[in-house]
Image (spheres, rainbow, N blue to C red):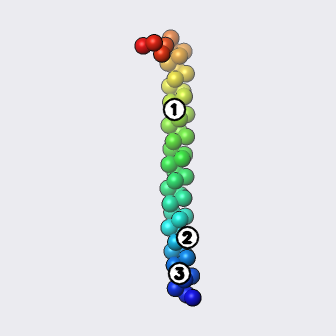
Amino acid sequence: MQKTKDNLHSEQAALKKRLKLIMGEVQMQEKLNERASEDIQNLRKSGWTEAY
């Protein structure tokens, strides 16, 4: 029984670690999307068109 609890605890810890990494990646992607959106707005303001 104790071994099962240890295994579950170990698996839970591994899942928490993976979730933390994934959440970090999601936050990074959101920042990249925000910057890309800002860059697009700045390009449009400067007269850049998609024809270039």
Label 3: which residue?
Answer: 6
Label 2: which residue?
Answer: 12
Q: At which x and y percent is residue 52? A: 42, 13
Q: Residue at x 55, y 64 (%)?
A: 16
Q: How would you rate the neighbour count of disc 2 (Cα within 10 Å): few for under 14, some for 14-19, many for 20 or more?
A: few
Q: Secondary structure at mark 2?
A: helix
Q: At which x and y percent is residue 6? A: 53, 81
Residue type beneath disc 1: Arg
| Numbered mark located on residue 35 in the image | 1
Q: Secondary structure at mark 3?
A: helix
**Distance (Cα) linking label 1 and label 2:** 35 Å
Tell me which corner region of the image, top left, top right, bottom left or bottom right, holds residue 5.
Answer: bottom right
Tell me which corner region of the image, top left, top right, bottom left or bottom right, holds residue 1.
Answer: bottom right
Q: Residue at x 51, y 74 (%)?
A: 10
| Numbered mark located on residue 1 in the image | none
Above or below: residue 4 compared with residue 20: below
Q: Secondary structure at mark 1?
A: helix
Q: Is residue 10 left or right of residue 52?
A: right
Mark sitting earlier along the chain (1/2): 2
Q: Residue at x 54, y 28 (%)?
A: 37
Residue type beneath disc 3: Asp
Residue type beneath disc 2: Gln
Q: Residue at x 52, y 23 (%)?
A: 40
Above or below: residue 10 compared with residue 44: below
**Distance (Cα) linking label 3 and label 2:** 10 Å
